[in-house]
């Protein structure tokens, strides 16, 4: 079977006369809903699960850090195994990836609510065991939905502009969930500046229902337009060929490193910000204001994304965003006795740079998937995206562990009504200086190591189209 790649008007490029709906707003909205669903559970976990474990279950911050570290490494392995499994499956009339989102989303959202069930009066050992079982189960099920969802972007359209648009819409979906959770949830789950187990469970159940609705919307609205050729009977994907291509895939390797660092920092900031606003600024509800500001920078930057990328290129826009974010966070660190108002104002500038890179990050992945096809001749969307997700999970593992260990290092005491000034200053350092340094490092990686600038990305698109056409003629 020939590889079917549909052009912008929606007609197949080949001998197949079947008409396919053109890429458009429906695909963008559907893809947005996918990450909206993902982050209804993911960001709730990132923002509140650690404080739930420390303040409700009574588990030490160090023990929680170890749990997060173990779970994320296991999830990273599951990602690769699941991605390889999906690549080995045949495509269906509804696509290769959407059916798996449909099948696995219900078990995922059920597991996401189970994590917040609190049974009073149990031992610390019981709570720790319950946390391990439910958290690791949720992480595994999250992989079964997120891997096909992330892989789908590379087959919805082969056009670079379309993929940049999908990346932006995906990030807007994530930020919409971020806004709903971090802006509204603190007003619900905190009572007298203390987290409420019953309210958090209620919130988790509601968000799980909404997440499931979003997944169904994603499946119904998106269309997979690029279909890999079927393997001959008995022919399988060559692992050696895949590995050889991965080793040579410099765009993937460099974006893996940058994404690992970015995710590690993003998760660290999400985790530590609860303590920053609750203890340093003594206003847990201020987290809502911060979340609104973060959402404003993303939605405000979205209209600028495509024009900026067309003029400068994806690499250049992402690198510039990281440099701006690094400067913003470092300035925050060096201002003594900062007020909440000044903190939020300066953070707004840094968050603009954060938003630009966050909006475009998924477009880097689709380019890396294409580059892998250019090297090996095989479409391995699931495998390559799983490798990318592996790096993000490693980043999450280090971030989860780092947040717990950092809190322990600065002397955080969950039983204290008010933290000491030394502890508060330590929390502030972790929340500002650490991300500033890491964002600067990401800028250097993108500027000097990532190879696909604007010119080379366009050439890759041309070379890959020629290679596909030659493969079709040979068949």
Image: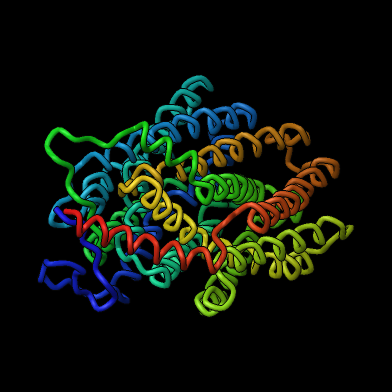
Most foreground residue, 80 or 228:
228
For image coordinates 85% across by 44% down, the residue present is 421
Report whether 332 appears left or right of 218: right
Instruction: Give the image location of residue 370, x and y in percent.
Output: 39, 55
Most foreground residue, 150 or 403:
150
The quarter holding residue 383 reads top left
Instruction: Give the image location of residue 7, x and y in percent.
Output: 27, 72
For image coordinates 58% across by 68% down, the residue present is 292
For image coordinates 27% across by 41% down, the residue present is 86
The quarter holding residue 382 reads top left
For image coordinates 44% across by 61% down, the residue present is 460
Most foreground residue, 438 or 449:
449
The quarter holding residue 237 reads top left
Report whether 322 appears left or right of 144: right
Outermost residue toward the right in this view: 336
Most foreground residue, 301 or 271:
301
Instruction: Give the image location of residue 89, x and y in percent.
Output: 20, 41
**Count of numbered badges drawn on the protein:** 0
The image's colouring method is rainbow
Asked if 351 appears above or below 312 in the picture, the reply is above
Asked if 331 appears above or below 390 in the picture, the reply is below
Whether residue 362 is visible here, answered yes or no, is: yes
Report whether 134 appears left or right of 434: left
Asked if 221 appears above or below 475 in the picture, the reply is below
Report whether 450 appears left or right of 382: right
Instruction: Give the image location of residue 390, x and y in percent.
Output: 47, 39
Whether residue 47 is visible here, answered yes or no, is: no
């Amino acid at each position: 079977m020939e590889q079917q790649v549909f052009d912008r008007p929606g007609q197949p490029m080949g001998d197949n006369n079947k008409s396919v709906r053109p890429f458009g707003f429906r695909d963008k909205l559907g893809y947005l809903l996918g990450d909206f669903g993902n982050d209804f559970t993911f960001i709730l976990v990132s923002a509140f699960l650690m404080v739930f474990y420390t303040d409700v279950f009574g588990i030490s911050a160090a023990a929680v850090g170890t749990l997060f570290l173990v779970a994320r490494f296991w999830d990273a392995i599951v990602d690769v195994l699941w991605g390889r499994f999906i690549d080995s499956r045949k495509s269906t009339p509804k696509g290769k990836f959407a059916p798996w989102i449909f099948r696995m989303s219900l078990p995922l959202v059920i597991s996401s609510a189970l994590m917040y069930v609190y049974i009073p009066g149990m031992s610390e050992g019981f709570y720790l065991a319950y946390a391990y079982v439910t958290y690791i189960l949720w992480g595994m099920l999250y992989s079964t939905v997120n891997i096909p969802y992330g892989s789908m972007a590379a087959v919805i359209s082969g056009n670079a502009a379309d993929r940049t648009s999908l990346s932006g819409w995906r990030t807007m979906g994530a930020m919409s969930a971020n806004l709903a959770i971090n802006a509204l949830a603190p007003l619900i789950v905190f009572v007298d500046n203390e987290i409420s187990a019953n309210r958090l469970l209620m919130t988790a159940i509601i968000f799980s229902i909404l997440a499931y609705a979003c997944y169904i919307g994603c499946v119904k609205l998106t269309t997979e337009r690029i279909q890999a050729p079927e393997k001959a009977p008995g022919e399988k994907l060559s692992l050696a060929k895949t590995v050889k291509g991965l080793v040579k895939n410099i765009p993937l390797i460099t974006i893996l490193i940058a994404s690992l660092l970015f995710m590690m920092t993003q998760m660290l900031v999400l985790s530590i910000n609860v303590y920053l606003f609750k203890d340093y600024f003594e206003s847990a509800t201020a987290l809502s204001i911060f979340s609104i500001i973060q959402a404003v920078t993303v939605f405000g930057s979205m209209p600028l994304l495509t024009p900026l990328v067309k003029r400068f290129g994806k690499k250049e826009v992402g690198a510039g965003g990281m440099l701006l974010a690094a400067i913003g966070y470092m300035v925050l660190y060096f201002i003594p006795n900062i007020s909440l108002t000044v903190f939020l104002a300066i953070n707004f500038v840094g968050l603009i740079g954060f938003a630009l890179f966050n909006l475009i990050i998924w477009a880097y992945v689709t380019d890396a998937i294409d580059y892998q096809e250019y090297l090996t001749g095989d479409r391995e969307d699931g495998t390559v995206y799983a490798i990318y997700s592996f790096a993000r999970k490693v980043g999450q593992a280090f971030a989860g562990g780092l947040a717990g260990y950092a809190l322990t290092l600065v002397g955080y005491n969950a039983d204290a009504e008010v933290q000491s000034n030394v502890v508060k200053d330590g929390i502030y350092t972790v929340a500002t200086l650490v991300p500033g340094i890491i964002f600067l490092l990401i800028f250097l990686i993108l500027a000097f190591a990532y190879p696909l600038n604007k010119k080379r990305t366009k050439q890759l698109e041309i070379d890959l189209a020629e290679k596909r056409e030659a493969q079709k003629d040979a068949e």
